[in-house]
Amino acid sequence: MRAGAPVVVKLGGSLMAGADLDALLDRVIDAVRPVVIVCGGGMFADAVRAAQGRLGFSDGLAHRLALDAMSQFAAVIAERRPQLALCNSLQAIAMAFERNRQALWHPVALRDGHPAIPETWAVTSDSLALFVAREIAAAAVILVKSADPAAAAATAQPDGSGPAVLRLVAAGHLDAAFPAFLAGGSGIVRILGPADHDRLGAAIAAPESDIGFDPLG
């Protein structure tokens, strides 16, 4: 059985068609701690943005459709890795852990709204990963992205001034709501770019280590 407090691993939507996805999933499945995977929306969310631009529907509806986009990526992963348990509730996550299975979050329950989650594009899967972590009292959140977070932070402020999390928001590397969700508490947070993808298993095992980029640094 896996041991320790759970870790939330958010897989960026841009990884959907990447060469690293299968290896990342294997590292989660083999991890020594229980894990909940939160999926980005990727190309499915891009389709929502494009449709909103053409059809002019509200941000509230766009938010709900973006949740569906995350669910679609989760469904793709569930088909590729049936060892993972597709979970649409906290109870389902707890049951997966009791059965020694890693969990794959299906955000369908949030379609009806949640008082802690604004229904705007300011909230994406990055902030929702923090929300899930708070709900399950996770030890850490690991955001796995296809771009280098340090480079993204430097793009916003080359001299490195200002909090890293704000520089990442300014660079579009994190969503606008992320600092507020982060302030609400969700354990340790690390961002893994491509250079650290092969260390995901180690980061899950010891989230207090210095693997990856610290957005509070």
Image (tube, grey):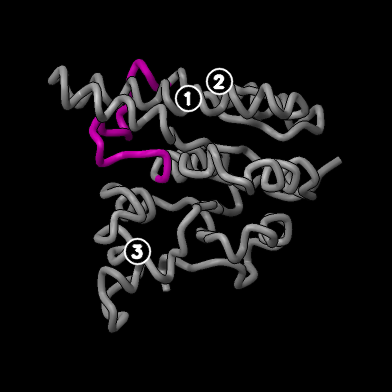
Q: Where's residue 152, x and y in %? A: 36, 65
Q: Is residue 70 above or below residue 185?
A: above
Q: Is residue 178 above or below residue 171?
A: above
Measured Cα–Cα span from mark 2 to mark 3 = 29 Å
| Residue denoted by label 1 | 107
In this rendering, the answer to whether 154 lies above or below 78 is below
Residue position marked by numbered label 3 in the rendering:
165
The answer to if 205 sits in the magenta stretch is no
Label 1 residue SS: helix
Residue in the image at 39% along x and 44% along y: 127
Segment tinted magenta in the rendering? 110-126
Give me the residue at 41% from left, 32% from top: 43
Determine which quarter of the picture holds residue 68.
top left
Residue 141 is tagged as none
Q: How crowded is mark 1: few (under 14 residues within 10 Å), some or many (20 or more)?
A: many
**Sequence-first disc among 3 and 1:** 1
Prevailing secondary structure class for the magenta stretch in the rendered image:
loop
| Amino acid tagged 1 | Pro
Q: Earlier in the sequence, mark 2 or mark 3?
A: 2
- Are the residues at dot 1 and dot 2 in contact (C-beta closer than 8 Å)? yes
Q: Is residue 115 magenta?
A: yes
* Badge 2 amino acid: Asn
Q: Residue 88 carries which label?
A: 2
